[in-house]
Amino acid sequence: MLTRIITAFFLIIAVILWLFVASYPIFTIGALFVYMLAAYEMGPLLGFKSKVPFVVVALIAATLCFYIAPPGLYIETQIPNVVKYIICSSLIYWCIAFFLVRSYPNNSSWLNNKILGSIAALFMLVPFLLSLLVLRAENYSQNVHTGAYLVLAIMALVWTCDSGAYFTGRALGKTPLIVNVSPKKTREGLLGGIVLAILCLLVCDHLGLYGSYVNTNGALMISGFACIIFSVLGDLVESMFKRKVNLKDSGKIFPGHGGMLDRIDSQLAALPVFLSLYYLISGQIF
């Protein structure tokens, strides 16, 4: 437990420095590091004997995205439409993923197909990377910290949902959520996590942490709620991948916390879903 607490402390410090101290180019490098490390850990979950093949695939995908729309454009002009399209494409994947998780292990043969698994993994990782960069670029030319608060506020929704679900589940949990994927998660815990995260959403909105996104408050509230719900799905999808290959953690980089994928699994769904629904509801995708 002490190791877990110490690791968490240093992780929090690192995230704060990355968000509020690093310039946008350095933030981009950090986001790429997170992305590539997650890709490195994803290989074994896809059934690859070596971690190299999917790392190469992920590197090519990120390179293509940066070539088509360099991140510098995010803060100099506006978010290119192609970036919005890529982010929104993940919404389709996460909706499909819901049914894949619900039907596991009955309909899990696709997990044995490395090509299908790699495509699914790219839909998880690439939109997440772009979402990080888009959110951090919010109003950057006017206030370099606006995007940092925005990223922190959205991540906080995931953290509060996870914490609320954990403590509520321990205290009141009786009904398994999806026993074949994650036996310890309960419906009571999920409800407790959602309630706490909604309170976090309202508090962050009151504090003005969502920048220009409050200009369409209805879209913000719906997107924030969806972000909370889909964050749970992100966790379950990673659990499904790990269960298929019989792994407890995706890696060991963080003592007491597992790997990078274990730390960002919920965020993989939360960030792109938030942006996708906001773009769609506010009409910014057309």
Image: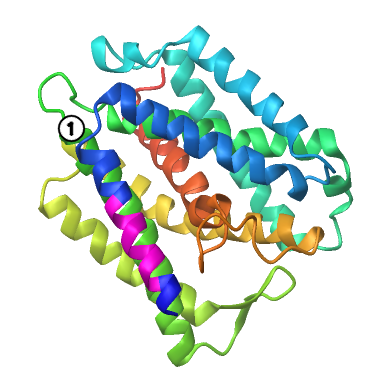
Q: Is residue 64 left or right of residue 144?
A: right
Residue found 57% across the figure and 51% down from its top = 261
Residue found 64% across the figure and 62% down from its top = 249
Residue found 77% across the figure and 40% down from its top = 117
In x, y percent, where is residue 243?
A: 76, 63
Quadrant containing the N terminus in the rendered view: bottom left
Figure quadrant of residue 4: bottom left
As drawn, 52 above or below 48:
above
Magenta span:
5-13
As drawn, 20 above or below 65:
below
In x, y percent, where is residue 236?
A: 62, 61
Task: From the viewer's side, name the closer residue of 118 and 17.
Answer: 17
In x, y percent, where is residue 2?
A: 41, 78
In x, y percent, where is residue 277?
A: 42, 38
Q: Is residue 203 left or right of residue 269?
A: left
Kindly identify the amino acid type of the residue bearing the numbered disc 1: Ser
Secondary structure at numbered mark 1: helix
Magenta stretch: helix, strand or loop mostly: helix
Task: From the viewer's side, name the closer residue of 113 and 263.
Answer: 263
Residue found 38% across the figure and 16% down from its top = 71
Quadrant containing the C terminus in the rendered view: top left
Task: From the viewer's side, name the closer residue of 137 and 197.
Answer: 137
Task: Bin the neighbour count of mark 1 within 10 Å (Cα to Cα): few under 14, some 14-19, many 20 and up.
Answer: some
Residue 71 visible, this orientation: yes
Q: Is residue 217 left or right of residue 65?
A: left
Q: Identify the residue position indicated by label 1 in the image.
A: 212
Residue 221 visible, this orientation: no
